[in-house]
Amino acid sequence: MSFDIHVRRRLGQRSIGIDLRSDNGIVALFGPSGAGKTSILNMVAGLLQPDWGRIAVAGTILFDSEGRLDLSVPRRRCGYIFQDDRLFPHMSVEANLRYGEMRASAPAIDFAATVDLLGLATLLDRRPATLSGGEAQRVAIGRALLSGPAFFLMDEPLASLDRARRDDILDRIAQLHALTAIPILYVSHDRDELLRLTSEIVTIAY
């Protein structure tokens, strides 16, 4: 079971939650800004504790309110990709990638394969400030991949990119999953973007 997530959390006047059970390796959360998609990702990542529920990814239970289980963020081994790249500005692209590699006990693919998959060979000596938005996101994905994640959470990672760069990175994400089989929970408010990745789309409404 790739994703088995049943959670509720009260935030202000709203109750945010999801009931998701899926064997699909890539699952998309779709909905307007403010619907609670990021809050759901944060519950899966361990950054926001649900009021009630259970979270299991790839057969590992991460949270269970009845069993009083709540794995710490590091033990969840989550590769979280944000809308902004969050690279270390004082490090080269290679150093950013190697930082991810140092955190992994057994990455799904090695440094050379990651660089090849994401088209990073010509960028290794550059600093993040010199990269385009698409280049920076490819580096961010590579750093997360090299950290040896058990699963990926991707929170509108392509929102600031133009269509051509979006299409390129979507193709690379699909290739990444085909190569590694690492489960991906992907958030966007662009349905066309999601349909390029997966047929399983869960709508989060107000």
Image (tube, rainbow, N blue to C red):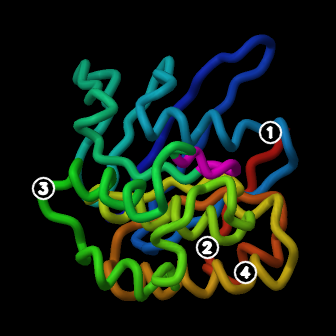
At a point 26% along the width and 29% down the height, the residue shown is 71
In the rendering, at what x and y percent does residue 186 appear? 60, 61
Q: Earlier in the sequence, mark 4 or mark 2?
A: 4
Secondary element type, mark 3? loop
Q: Earlier in the sequence, mark 1 or mark 4?
A: 1
The residue labelled by disc 2 is 200
3D distance between C-alphas at marks 1 and 4: 20 Å
Q: Is residue 19 left or right of residue 166?
A: left
Q: Which mark is residue 105?
A: 3
At a point 63% along the width and 33% down the height, the residue shown is 39
**Mark 2 and mark 1 residues within 8 Å of each other at the beta carbon:** no
Crowding at label 1, few (<14), some or many (≥20) Cα neighbours within 10 Å? some
Secondary element type, mark 2? loop
Q: Which mark is residue 116?
A: none
Q: Which mark is residue 195?
A: 4
* Foreground tag (4 vs 2): 4
What amino acid type should be assigned to the residue bearing mark 3?
Answer: Ser
What amino acid type should be assigned to the residue bearing mark 1?
Answer: Ala
Residue 202 is a magenta residue: no
Image quarter of the N terminus: bottom left
What amino acid type should be assigned to the residue bearing mark 2?
Answer: Glu
In the rendering, at what x and y percent does residue 37 appear? 69, 43
Q: Earlier in the sequence, mark 2 or mark 3?
A: 3
The residue labelled by disc 1 is 35
Query: Is the residue 66 above or below the residue 168 in the image?
Result: above
Q: Earlier in the sequence, mark 2 or mark 1?
A: 1
User: What residue range appears in magenta?
Assistant: 82-87
